[in-house]
Image (cartoon, rainbow, N blue to C red):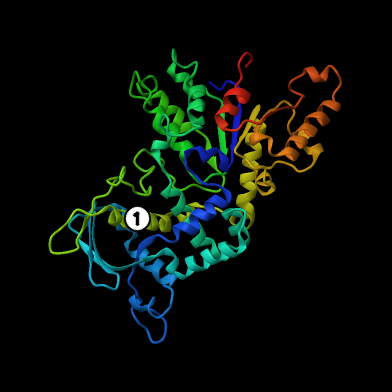
Amino acid sequence: MFNTKTLFILGAGASVPYGYPIGKKLIHNIIEDMEDSIFIPRYQSKNAPPYWNENDKKNNVLYDFNSCMEGFKQISFYADESEARHFEPCNNNGLFKIYYTSKSNPLNFAHQFFFQTQIKQVDAFAQLKNALEILDPVSIDAFLRDNPSYSQAGKMMILYSLLKREDPLKFNINQSDDNWYSLLLNDLVSECADSPNKLSKNEVKFITFNYDVSLDYFLHSRLKKIENFVTSDDTSESPAESFLNALDIEHVYGQLYLHVNSDQYGKYIDLSEDNKLLNIKISWIESTTQQSPPLTSLKLIQNFKRFIFSFEQYNNIKTMYDERNNPTERAQRIAKHKDAIQWSEEIIFIGFGFDRDNLNLLGIPDTLSEYTQMLPGKTIRYLNYKGMMTSLSFEFENIQNERNAALNSNSRKDKSKTINIIQSTADNISNAYQNDFKKFLFK
C-alpha cells in the first residue's frame, strides 16, 4: 500500500493504453467523427423565404446550429431515459418520425420529426472542421484556448469522440499491452489482506489533466469485485466503499460525466458486431412489418444518443480559455494543487508533457531558485518516454544539482532537505511503474 504520501499527476499519455487518443490524434478523430450521421430536429429555417430544413441541403445551406440545439433541449430528457423507441422513415428526403416514452412516465408516448444528416452539415461543426483542417493545431485544448468562439461545438466533439472510444473491455487481461492500472491496484491492496480496512489508509491522491474517467471507473469497478474488500462485519461501509468515497481524483479540466459507475462507462461506445446489443432497445420500422434493426441502423441510433449526451454534458468540459477568464476559480484551483504538492512526499508524473500552461495551473514555478525552495524533502519520479525529452531531463538534473550544491555535507544526508529526481526512459508506463517508480527494499 502507499504508506508514503504519493501524488500522481497524469497527462494525456496515461490514458493511451485504454484506447484514448492524444494531441493531433484526437483532432484527427474529431474531424473524422464529424462525418458520422445523426438525427437533428426538424425546424423552420429563418432564411428568406422560410422553408423547412429538409430543403437546406438542396439550397446549399448548412443546418443552423442554434435551431438544432433548441430542438435538442426539448427532447434531451427522453433521449437517454427512453425505455423503448421507434424510428420510422417518413419519406425519401431523410425525414424520420421518432417515438419515445420515459421510464418515469411510460404512458407519456410522444413523437417528433427529425432529419438524418452528417454532423458536418450543421454550420458550427462545419466551421469547426474547416478551422481545424486549416490551422492544424497541436491539440484541441490549445485550439479552444485561442479560438473561444468554437467552444460549444468543440467541447461537444471532444465528448462525442472520447465517448465513442470508451471501452470497458480494455481493462481486461490481454486487452491492453500496457495495463498499468492493474499495477496501481496491486499496490493499493497490498499489505491489506489481513486487515481489509487498511485500504483506506493509503496515502495517495491523483491530479489528472484528462477528460476521460478511465482511472475512476477502473478503481470503482475492480475494488468492488475483490472479495476481501466488499464484505463488512456490520451495517457500515465496506472497505472498498470507504476507500472509494474518500478517493481524491481531481480532473483539472473537467470530465466526460460526473457519476462514474459500471452502467455508464462504455454506454456510448461505437457499436460493432461484438457489442451491438449494448443498452439498445429499439425498433426500426421500415415497412408495415416491424423488423429487427440492422447494425447500420443501431450505429446511427447510438450516434444520435451519443450526440445528445454530448450536448447535455458539454459544460462539464473546461478549457484553458475558461480557466484564464475565471480568475477567482483559477486561483482557488492553483492553491488546491499547491497544497497537494506540499502534502506529498513523492510526486509521480505519468504521460505528462510539462506544458507551461498546465504547470502554471499546478502552481509549479518557472525559475530554478523557486524549485529548490518548493521541493525539498520530495522525490520526483517522471516518465520521459524513450528519453525523448532531452531538455526536460537536463532541467530536472539542474534542479537536483542546484539544491545539493546549496547544502553542506551533513545536510545532504537529511532527506527532508534534499530533492531526489528519478527519471524513467521506459517505452511504456508499466515498465516505468514496475521497474523505475516502484520501491522495493526501502519505504
Q: Is residue 208 left or right of residue 294?
A: right
Q: 395 above or below 242?
A: below
Q: Is residue 383 left or right of residue 190?
A: right
199 or 22: nearer the viewer: 22
Q: Position of residue 212 (x, y in %)?
A: 48, 44
Q: Is residue 60 visible?
A: yes
Q: Is residue 344 visible?
A: no
Res. 404 image quadrant: top right
Label 1: how many Cα within 10 Å (few below 14, some 14–19, many 20+): many
Q: Position of residue 424 (x, y in %)?
A: 66, 29
Q: Quadrant of the C terminus?
A: top right
Residue farthest toward the bottom in the current orientation of the protein? 49
Q: Which kind of residue does numbered mark 1 sit on?
A: Lys
Residue occupying image coordinates x 28% and y 57%: 297
Q: 87 above or below 279?
A: below
Res. 250 image quadrant: top right
Q: Is residue 269 left or right of residue 253?
A: left
Q: 50 above or below 214?
A: below
Q: Position of residue 181 (x, y in %)?
A: 49, 31
Q: Which residue is mark 1?
A: 305
